[in-house]
Image: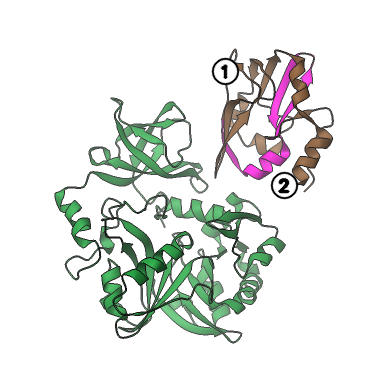
Chain colours: A green, B brown
Amino acid sequence: MKKTPLADTHVNLGARMVDFAGWYMPVQYVGLREEHDNVRKNVGLFDVSHMGEVRVKGPKALETLEWLTTNDVAKLNDGEAQYSLLPNDQGGLVDDIIVYCLKKNEDYLVCVNASNKDKDFAWMNKHNNGADLVDESDLWGQIAIQGPKALELCDRVFGFKVSEMKPFHLQHGTFQNHKIMVATTGYTGEKGCEVFVEAGGTVALWNELLEKGKDLGVMAIGLGARDTLRTEVKYSLYGHEIDDTTNPYEAGLGWVIKPAKKDFMGKVLIVGKKEAGLTKSLIGFKMLEKGIPRQGYSLFSFDNKEIGKVTSGTHSPTLDEPIGIAYIDLAYAKEGTEFHLDIRGRKVKAVVVKTPFVQK
Amino acid sequence: MAFHIPEDYYYTKEHEWAQVDENIVTVGITEFAQDQLGEIVYVELPEEGQKITQGQTFGVIESVKAVSDLYAPVSGTVIEVNTALGDDPSVLNDDPVNEGWLVRIEMDTEKELANLMRAPDYKKLISEK
């Protein structure tokens, strides 16, 4: 298993470690609910060093990224970031990503999912339009700092006002002679940032954040709570809401598709499906009877027609009730529509609800 | 972490405990199991009168994160179900080896007990985890 620079730190903190996409990662420290609540109320630190970073440089950098991704990369100025998608040539998705503009037109950092890193890098290389592509994943540690008190903690540690940065922006800095890039992005629905730090500085930065955040109630947070947090705000996770066959419009990601502005990989198929008529929609739902939804469970109409599948489901710690995300046939996607969920052979009533489940 | 593992109980390798009182067997999950599961939020148990078979699943426990099957330590007929867990499954986290019992079974044959672990072997099993 691969290890992040923080692996030993997690073990010393008493984390329960698991194999996550080939990485030795903490699933929880003191307990999922306590960690989850702490991110909603105070601030939490996540080791996200397992995420991949691909540097895209050179005179062809922009052109290459415009072709490889669905969002409008050309509009990014230095220090700006955007959520985007790496489409494949079949109308589906290789991954969902964040593109950070380090220098307009010629230098970008693409942050990709840990589980997809090798696939993404190979794909980008295969369809490279002349950019200088480097897999920098081993060069960077990455720590996410999330929660209502996250920005106050960041201000104390980074030497500049992270709290004054707009969302989806990036600022360069140093921490103990290690280069850092602080980006106001995140995956919990809370305020906060994600910090890229030269790998050798990761442990020192982590420890400094824990030390300087003591009075703010800072806590290390495992992958378990990361998943319940992102589910509560209905953020997509590759392998759940998104995969090689996903049409982004059906996934509710049409806002990062810019067909009017540019041509991109798979555009004809992705947009073509929208024009031909989408058939399903990604919705949030709650249970009307006892039971907890889990990925893969089927949805049925009351006349017993299979109408969808659960992509993510859990007991929401914030709401203290079960919540789920599912693809459902368009005819049933309207808020308030009731259906049956098949929980291990038991048909249980559920209802389509407004999302995010937890409003921030 | 030191877990409370009663000496006079029997154990499955899937971390259920069985307390035997003549031919009535009370079944639950071990402290180790609840610790691994994390916060338990839902329990699905059989109904009274239902037959269950040693080694087969007889119910489900769900924590915030995961679904786990429950495995029958012995074969027999369910004669009592801990319905209190339906209203408050967190009892399973607080007191899995007493208040958090799951079902009582009238067992078919004592012979099956030979397939279960005693406390020392169970302690060894979890110490290797």
Q: Crowding at label 1, few (<14), some or many (≥20) Cα neighbours within 10 Å?
A: some
Chain hosting mark 1 = B
**Type of residue at label 1?**
Glu
- Residue A173 screen position, x and y as percent: 50, 84
- Relative to B66, is A67 on the left or the right? left
**Type of residue at label 2?**
Lys
Residue range of the region highlighted in magenta in the rendering: B15-43
Q: Residue at x 51, y 63 (%)?
A: A147
In the picture, which quadrant includes the N terminus of chain A?
Answer: bottom right
- Relative to A81, is B102 on the left or the right? right
Q: Name the residue under label 1.
A: B47
**Extreme residue toward the front, this view:** A126
Q: Nearer the viewer, residue B68 or A31?
A: B68
Q: Name the residue under label 2.
A: B129
Q: Residue at x 35, y 34 (%)?
A: A299
- Residue A237 screen position, x and y as percent: 42, 55
Q: Which of B19 and A44 is in front in this view?
A: B19
In the picture, which quadrant includes the C terminus of chain A?
Answer: bottom left
